[in-house]
Amino acid sequence: QVQLVESGGGLVQAGGSLRLSCAASGRTFSSNNMGWFRQAPGKEREFVAAISRSGISRYYADSVKDRFTISRDNAKNTVDLQMNSLKPEDTAVYYCAASGGPWGPTIATIRPYDYWGQGTQVTVSS
């Protein structure tokens, strides 16, 4: 089992940056692909970024490509999301998630993810 705790959210002006971090408990962190999702009020949870077990493969939603960077440290059991050039439409609760399944096209969907954190609020003011 994997327990996930996000941190680093907050209020930032448009154009600013934030770095989210997700700390995982358990000895199986390195055997999981990791993802970040977000959910704005009244909207469905949507994919943001994912990183493979080794950290070699990464995948981003088009809306955040070239602005966000996902990274992981398997020695520290952490996965981070560096968010630059933030926009008001990035405002949402951001969730960290772990997937024990294969790396593939479904990594950008909710289905493969077995464990979820409680989320951290990111608010971008205009």
Image (cartoon, rainbow, N blue to C red):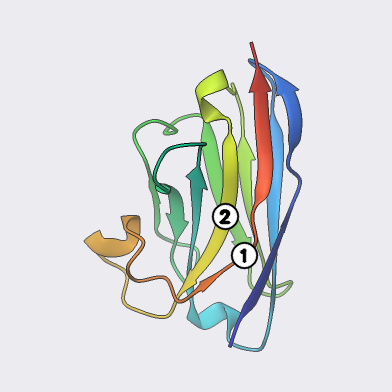
Label total for image: 2
Q: Which residue type carries mark 1?
A: Gly
Q: Position of residue 30 (x, y in %)?
A: 56, 79
Above or below residue 14? Residue 54 is: below
Q: Up-down: is 124 above or below 111? A: above
Quarter containing the N terminus: bottom right
Please tell me whether mark 2 sits on a helix, a strand or a loop.
Answer: strand
Q: Residue at x 63, y 40 (%)?
A: 82
Q: Position of residue 8 (x, y in %)?
A: 76, 46
The kind of secondary structure element at disc 1 is loop
Q: Mark 2 = which residue?
A: 95
> Which residue lies most toward the top here?
126
Q: Which mark is residue 61?
A: none
The tag earlier along the polypeptide, 2 or 1, is 2
Label 2 Cα crowd, 10 Å radius (few <14 / some 14-19 / many 20+): many
User: Which residue shows up at 59% across the image and 21% down it?
Assistant: 85
User: Marks 2/1: CA distance?
Assistant: 6 Å
The image quadrant where one finds the C terminus is top right
| Pointers 2 and 1 in contact (C-beta within 8 Å) | yes
Residue at the spot of label 1: 117
Please tell me which residue is depicted at 67% across the width and 29% down the height of the picture: 123
Question: Relative to 106, is 87 on the left or the right?
Answer: right
Q: Name the residue at 57% across, 20% down.
A: 88
| Residue 84 percent location from the top left of the image | 61, 28
